[in-house]
Image (cartoon, helix red, strand yellow):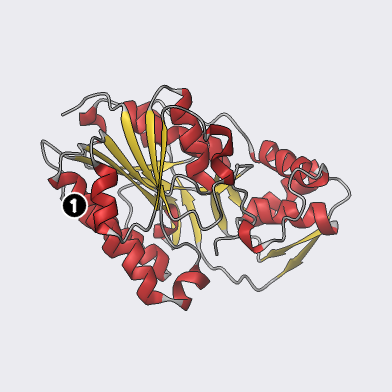
Amino acid sequence: MTEFPKKIIIAGGAGYLGSVLTGQLLERGYAVRVLDRLLFGEESLAAWRDHPNLEIFRGDLRDIRLVLEALRGMDAAILLAALVGEKACDDDPVETVGVNYVATIALAEACAQFGVPRFIFASTDSAYGIQEGIMTEESPLNPMSLYARLKVQAEQKILSLASDQFAPCVLRMATIYGLSPRPRFDLIVNLLTMNAATRGRCTVYGGKQWRPQVHVADAAHAYCLALEAPVESVRGQVFNVGSNEQNYQIGQLADLIREAIPHVVVETTDVPPDLRDYHVNFDKIKRALGYEVQRSVADGVCEIYQAIVSGQIPDPDQEKHRNA
């Protein structure tokens, strides 16, 4: 097995997280092949378009012929591509299952069968659902949406493929925030900041729910570390990605935004539309991979706010800035 992979395929490499990860891997000297439907165009990869180590395969994860062609010669695969958001998944459950489970497993099985030795699967810490206490990777899972249930089912199947020749691992992501070449404003910190910047006010639903956060650049760095770790450190492993210090209640996130943008009016309502509530422990990834976050929620709020008020993102309300 290749101990230090050099050729990486990222399914979903033009997305919110993927475009940041693509840039980080190219900067670290990797050859990167992006497989993406490019529903929002190639603008997110514009800074790297002429890079000699970047290839772009435009296509659907469900196209097995394209997938097999794209896997040729790769040392590792990272699967970020998915339909996301509870509403989007519930609106089309057939397509959601087709992408988030069937095509996901097909890609993992193809990697195992055709000699792509490392595989990193992007999962979610919403798999923990509503639970009391602090969740570790060994805690029981309680997925509350179709999206989360399929992530859990895919995790289990992918990890079952582990062998001496195939080293899958799972990264359960905290909720991501911060600026990306493909901005998203359907994520809690980014959404609240956008509303503060464009309307001078933001609304918090509930406020007591715990929701760990991680900056998009720090999230991408976790994939770099998982690629570069000794294979025995990651084979068959699950890692929560985030930091203990960035476990926040939704109301606390609003307070951070109020501190960063003093004129903003924060409104609250007692009825939370999203009942997920989980406090997560991130010691394992720090201990095993040396992972440390470098950015705070305040950093993310400031960069999003400045990008909007400066006109760098002229119309953040556009549909292209939402996945859900």
Of all residues, the one furthest to the right in this rendering is 263
What residue lies at 44% left-to-right and 61% top-to-bottom? Answer: 131
Assign the N terminus to one quadrant of the image. Answer: top left
- Out of 4 and 34, give the one closest to the viewer: 34
Q: Which residue is mark 1?
A: 109
Location of residue 195 in the rendering, given as x and y in whole percent from the top left corner: 76, 57
For label 1, the crowd category at 10 Å Cα-Cα, with few meaning under 14, some 14 to 19 and many 20 or more, is: some
Assign the C terminus to one quadrant of the image. Answer: bottom right
Location of residue 18 in the rendering, given as x and y in whole percent from the top left corner: 47, 43
- Out of 85 and 126, give the one closest to the viewer: 85
User: Could you tell me if residue 243 is visible in this image?
Assistant: no
What residue lies at 42% left-to-right and 53% top-to-bottom? Answer: 124
Residue 30 vertical placement versus 55 (above, below) = above
Q: Is residue 142 toward the left or the right of residue 302 in the image?
A: left
What residue lies at 69% left-to-right and 71% top-to-bottom? Answer: 270
Of all residues, the one furthest to the left in this rendering is 164
The three-letter amino acid code for the residue at tag 1 is: Glu
User: Could you tell me if residue 222 is visible in this image?
Assistant: yes
Residue 40 vertical placement versus 130 (above, below) = above
| Local SS, label 1 | helix
What residue lies at 12% left-to-right and 36% top-to-bottom? Answer: 165
